Amino acid sequence: MILLDTNVISASMRAEGDANVTRWMDRQPASTLFLSAVTVDEITLGIEVLPAGRRRSRLARIFAEIIGVFSGRVLTFDTDAAIESARIRSQRQQKGLPMSLADSQIAGIAPEQRLLACHDESARLRRD
């Protein structure tokens, strides 16, 4: 089972799309893919700060459809995830590899739910 990072969902929402992400997601059984409430927050914020217009409307419609597809598979950020998130961020900081709060929160949710965290980096999809 796989917890999708925000940038995977964002890449799938682009007008031109990301062929690597789309192909990879199409090969996964839908029931094995999950979102986090953190991703919902990040993408909603990204849409809300856009000026009113066609682009904002298109992205809001697409994201509403995505939320519907993931109904029952959006995971919350709870106390255990918060502790894991802080542990992950601390370890990375000690190695000189800073991590954003949102990314560490998503990473903190994955182990608690026994999921792999999946993100898109440099146009390549990879699993951690």
Image (cartoon, helix red, strand yellow):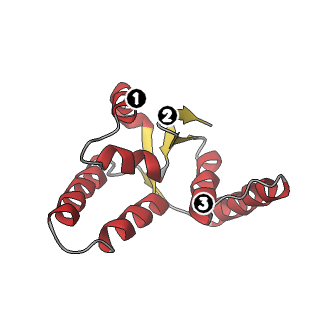
Distance of label 3 from label 1 (alpha carbons): 24 Å
Q: Please give the residue where the numbered disc 1 appears in the rendered image.
A: 24
Are there few (<14), some (14-19), or many (20+) residues within 10 Å of tag 3? many
Distance of label 2 from label 3 (alpha carbons): 20 Å
Q: Specify the amino acid type for callout 1.
A: Trp
Which is closer to the viewer, label 3 or label 1?
Answer: 1
Q: Residue at x 65, y 66 (%)?
A: 79
**In front here: 52 or 104?**
52
Residue 33, image quadrant = top left
x and y, in percent, of residue 77 in the image: 55, 63
Q: Specify the amino acid type for callout 2.
A: Leu
Picture layout, residue 122 above or below residue 71: above
Residue 89, image quadrant = bottom right
Residue 62: mark: none
Residue 25 appears left or right of 107: left
Are there few (<14), some (14-19), or many (20+) residues within 10 Å of tag 2? some
x and y, in percent, of residue 104 in the image: 63, 58
Q: Please give the residue where the numbered disc 3 appears in the rendered image.
A: 105
- The reply to whether callout 2 and callout 1 are in contact (CB within 8 Å) is yes
Residue 125: mark: 2
Residue 40 appears left or right of 14: right
Q: Specify the amino acid type for callout 3.
A: Gln
Q: Residue at x 27, y 56 (%)?
A: 63
Which is closer to the viewer, label 2 or label 3?
Answer: 2
